[in-house]
Image (cartoon, rainbow, N blue to C red):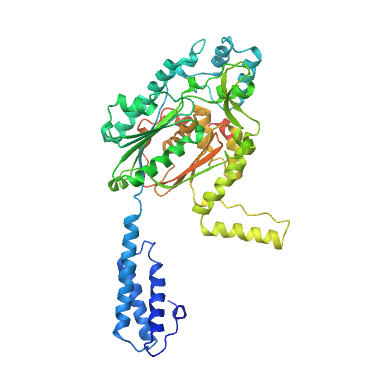
Amino acid sequence: MDPLSLPKLKQHNSLSNIIAIFLSTMAMLSKNLHSTSTPLQLLLVLLSLQRLFLFQQWNWNPIFHLLLLFCFFLVYVLRVGALALKPPSVYLVDFSCFKPPSTCQLPLSRFIQHASSIISFDSQSVEFMAKIVASSGLSEQTYLPPALLSSPPKTHQREYIKEAEMILLPLMDDLLTKAKLSPRDIDILVIHCSAFCPSPSLSSIIVNKYSMRSDVKSFNLSGMGCSAGAIGIDLAQNLLKTNNNCYAIVISTEILSAGWYSGHERSKLLINCLFRMGSAALLLTNRKEASKTSKYRLIRTLRTQTAFDDKAYLTAIREEDDDGKLGVTIDKGLLPAAGELLRSHMTILGLKILPLTEKLKHVVSVIRKKFKDKEGEIYMPSFKTAIQHFCLPTSGRALIGEIAKGLNLDGRDVEASLMTLHRFGNQSSSSMWYELAYMEAKERVKKGDKVLMLGMGTGPKCCSCVWECVRPIAGDSNKNNPWRDCIHLYPIEAGSSISQT
């Protein structure tokens, strides 16, 4: 401890010396207020102050002893109060990913044949979709719902409900079985689906099917796009902050038959080519005992958006074409808008999670470029110093490649994203969970590792979640992991070449 950090006390017991001691002691002890210091460590700081005063041979008065004891007591009370007011940690107990039946698989040849049989598509539309699918990075094993495999596709309310029940009910059953919970143990339910918003809502359908409690807090989000997964987690986290000892289920899904486009506009046909069946459910809790059995702890969530900018807002929007057919228009400006949004989002996230050394390197490089070496490059902080695993949007190889380039990620970092795109396609907001399932099946996630989940959706908006693995995951890949029957085939060589694009 540096004696110069304390004021030079005079030999007499003046009021100014008492005030100086009080302020200096409070400043030193308060450094431990928000740390993990124990009461014993705080007491050692106090004793070291006493030894310092004796070393300086100040004329001691009992009032100084009482003042130091009072400082210790006050800081300790404030520290305990701060810990008591701190919201409980949110844990991910487990999660489940829906794997459609093999009857729903759609090889490229079958897709072309099926699209050709649909009267509403002309030959140019079929040729365009075939070209997009062939170059998209999707395998021959992705899935479409039964309603879209019919000829013509069945796109009406009854089929939407059938598809929702086909996905959501097995998903709920699997998650509850894994967690060994009853539906009546669930306190919070959040479901998000962008294209389909029925009345009663999807969350009400689940509450009804499982006879959940009358006081369950249920929420239904729509229109959020591929970022809805992280948004749902953020919502559940905020609810768990104000409700103690609760279980929350968050379900990410998309009803593809409700988003199918049957017209001729190429900007709307892209949705038919890239999106495939998929859904994920996760169980969150703030119970203290869950810290020993859960897989992950939620470290941070962050949300940013650029919906205030008209140009960005119109890059992906659901609207009717000239024939009155509803579809989602994907504008050419989507990638540039997504790049700007991601840059803004990652800058904010970096300030919160990156180590100080990375921040200093960036600041020093900026100053050097401005005042000394104008031709020099600005150092881009490495997110791999804080994050070990990345779950990126599976909106296409081009977007994955751009994100990898911006974050300076290598092929192994984006492997899970590319392989998920290849095996299952773009599953909207649930894709990030298939990516995490891939990492678990490969037994790559170790205790203490950090996982970044990044979602980007219409709006545009960007949302992220940072998780910390709190226990070994090895062996969990056998619990209905969607990759368990094919993980030995991945990564494929095609995926390695994809990562270089």
Residue 317 on image: x %, y %: 58, 29
Give the tally of numbered discs: 0
In front: 24, or 447? 24
Q: Residue at x 59, y 11 (%)?
A: 120
Up-down relation of residue 470 to residue 314 (above or below): below
Up-down relation of residue 56 to residue 298 (above or below): below
In front: 255, or 71? 71
* Quarter where residue 203 is shown: top left
Viewport quadrant of the C terminus: top right
In front: 382, or 48? 48
List the single residue furthest toward the right.
Answer: 375
Viewport quadrant of the N terminus: bottom left
Q: Is residue 452 visible?
A: no
Up-down relation of residue 169 to residue 34 (above or below): above
Up-down relation of residue 189 to residue 17 (above or below): above
Residue 327 on image: x %, y %: 56, 22
Task: Determine whether, in the image, residue 111 is placed left or right of residue 252.
Answer: right
Task: Determine whether, in the image, residue 183 is placed left or right of residue 331.
Answer: left
Residue 87 on image: x %, y %: 35, 51
